[in-house]
């Protein structure tokens, strides 16, 4: 099957006739725009809080937690890089499982993808307001409840206004958005690097690594729990933005794999260095006798307050400004992403067709409005940064788990398909990445997983309403046989988490380490089951042709307007 875009587009429009207004998405983003969309999403509020929360959860061994998280994300990114280059469509992560397993699995992973994208912007807003407590005008926007800063009434109003700003900027169009995000990301990368350099020189104490109750006061469980629940995986999320925006990439087959991989490398290096510097720069009085209860644990602006404590006031000023720009840039791009995911889900027949409606700038306006409303609703049950981290992390990892499965199917069913970039050791990479994704879900713990289960149930209700009432005439076949493994997977993972050392039981059925063995064995069973029942080659080619080829024709139609962004 040839999926390359045609060199020319022939039309029967009379010479001299006015050019009709082009609708749909526009391919106007170059490599830098894609790279900064992914890297800018990774470097958001996670860097402002991640070093502090990981240190509370794992002590100095949080450095190991960051390395584990970075390796896990890199394995998942490799599968996304190959898939994104093969089929550059809008909302790619939501659509790859659709091509491999049909309607039943596609609808599920599509919802996971949209849920993750739509809830990131609210958490970035919460980060902006949390750091904003430094300013007198914002001092009444949050209050302390059970030791955590949560939104007050005026704070909720401020949060809604910030969400409205994200949405408004998105209506300017993808080209202006990419320019805005690229400019913000240069700053977002520069400020953490400056922080690493300054704090590492001014006030670094190697003795901090064994201070208080030691290097690893909470053992292996603390190290692994920190990966999922303290914001480490959340901080490293975002590489998939290049896949989500693939439908607007000028040269997708060349640029998307590079953007995905390089963004993870940039983010991982910066975050590990930030953890080392934050740990080393803490004054001894902030550490006390326990990493879990030191004075530093009450900081609402960790790096900025640390800079003040070590007499680098000018850096603290920059960091308080960055606390607006870094989360703001990430919230902005995820608002974009959620509308593109809903656009892709509509093209696949899962969401109502109104989500494909675009304005004169090629912006999916209904998807933007939906993301705005859902984001605002999130402030009610999740009024603090930490309350949203676990849910978003679990939803993201569940979304990511679909890519290794689709990757494995395409390697088996479409071995000769064009792959502009080919991931190494594919037969090993796919099942390994799937196991890693499920371990991250395990480490998120039961308190997060049951909430994710509620969100998944809501999604199934929405998808069922769309299908029952015929809100999209392209509703695909459910292909129940190809998705027969999915309910067993979802229920089984929930059961393992409940029965594990990360669940609510005092005497878990699966104690530490054995719970990870259980997840690995269960994941392998699900993976090979999914490979066995995946759609046949002819059906996959048909589904890809129905959706991907029309969108690749859009590449040719927009090439005269494409420009490096």
Image (cartoon, rainbow, N blue to C red):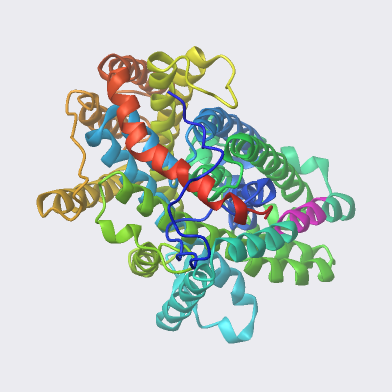
466 horizontally vs 332: left or right = left
Q: Is residue 39 above or below residue 410?
A: below
Q: Is residue 512 above or below residue 135?
A: above
271 horizontally vs 541: left or right = right
Residue occupying the point 53% across, 38% down = 227
Q: Position of residue 173 (x, y in %)?
A: 53, 66
Q: Which residues are magenta?
A: 188-196
Quarter placement of the C terminus: bottom right
454 horizontally vs 358: left or right = left
Residue occupying the point 43% across, 46% down = 91
Q: Residue furthest bottom?
A: 137
Q: Is residue 20 above or below residue 203?
A: below
Residue occupying the point 49% across, 59% down = 336
Q: Main secondary structure of the magenta part?
A: helix
Q: Is residue 194 magenta?
A: yes
Count of picture labels = 0
Residue occupying the point 40% across, 29% down = 438
Q: Is residue 65 magenta?
A: no
């Amino acid at each position: 099957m040839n999926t390359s875009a045609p060199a020319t587009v022939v039309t029967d429009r009379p010479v001299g006739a006015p050019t009709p207004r082009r609708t749909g998405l526009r391919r106007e983003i170059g490599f830098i725009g894609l790279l900064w969309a992914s890297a800018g999403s990774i470097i958001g509020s996670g860097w402002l809080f991640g070093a502090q929360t990981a240190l509370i959860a794992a002590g100095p061994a949080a450095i190991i937690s960051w390395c584990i998280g970075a390796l896990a994300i890199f394995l998942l990114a490799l599968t996304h890089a190959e898939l994104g280059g093969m089929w550059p469509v809008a909302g790619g992560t939501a659509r790859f499982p659709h091509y491999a397993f049909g309607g039943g699995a596609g609808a599920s992973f599509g919802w996971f993808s949209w849920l993750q994208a739509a809830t990131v912007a609210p958490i970035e807003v919460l980060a902006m307001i949390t750091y904003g407590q430094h300013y007198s005008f914002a001092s009444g926007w949050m209050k302390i409840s059970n030791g955590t800063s949560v939104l007050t009434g005026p704070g909720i109003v401020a949060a809604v206004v910030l969400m409205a700003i994200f949405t408004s900027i998105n209506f300017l169009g993808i080209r202006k958005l990419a320019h805005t995000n690229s400019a913000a990301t240069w700053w977002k990368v520069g400020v953490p690097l400056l922080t690493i350099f300054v704090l590492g020189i001014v006030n670094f104490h190697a003795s901090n690594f064994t201070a208080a109750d030691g290097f690893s006061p909470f053992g292996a469980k603390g190290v692994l729990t920190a990966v999922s629940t303290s914001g480490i995986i959340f901080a490293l999320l975002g590489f998939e933005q290049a896949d989500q925006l693939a439908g607007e990439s000028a040269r997708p087959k060349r640029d998307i794999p590079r953007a995905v991989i390089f963004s993870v490398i940039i983010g991982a290096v910066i975050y590990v260095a930030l953890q080392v510097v934050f740990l080393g720069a803490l004054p001894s009085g902030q550490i006390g006798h326990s990493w879990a209860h030191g004075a530093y644990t009450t900081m609402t602006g960790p790096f900025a307050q640390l800079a003040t404590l070590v007499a680098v006031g000018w850096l603290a000023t920059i960091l308080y400004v960055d606390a607006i720009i870094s989360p703001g840039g990430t919230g902005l791009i995820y608002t974009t992403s959620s509308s593109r995911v809903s656009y892709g889900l509509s093209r696949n027949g899962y969401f109502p067709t109104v989500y494909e409606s675009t304005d004169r700038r090629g912006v999916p306006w209904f998807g933007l409005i939906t993301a705005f409303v859902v984001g605002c609703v999130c402030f009610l049950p999740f009024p603090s940064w930490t309350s949203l981290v676990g849910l978003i992390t679990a939803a993201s990892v569940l979304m990511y788990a679909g890519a290794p499965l689709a990757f494995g199917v395409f390697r088996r069913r479409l071995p000769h398909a064009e792959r502009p970039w080919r991931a190494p050791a594919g037969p090993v990479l796919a099942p390994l990445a799937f196991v890693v994704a499920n371990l991250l879900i395990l480490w998120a713990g039961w308190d997060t997983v049951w909430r994710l289960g509620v969100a998944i149930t809501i999604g199934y209700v929405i998808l069922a309403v769309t299908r029952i009432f015929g809100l999209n005439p392209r509703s695909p076949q459910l292909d129940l046989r190809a998705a027969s493994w999915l309910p067993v997977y979802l229920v089984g993972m929930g059961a393992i988490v409940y029965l594990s050392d990360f669940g609510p039981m005092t005497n878990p059925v699966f104690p530490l380490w054995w719970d990870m063995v259980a997840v690995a064995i269960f994941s392998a069973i699900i993976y090979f089951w999914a490979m066995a029942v995946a759609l046949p080659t002819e059906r996959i080619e048909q589904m890809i042709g129905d959706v991907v080829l029309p969108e690749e024709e859009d590449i040719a139609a927009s090439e005269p307007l494409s420009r490096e962004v």
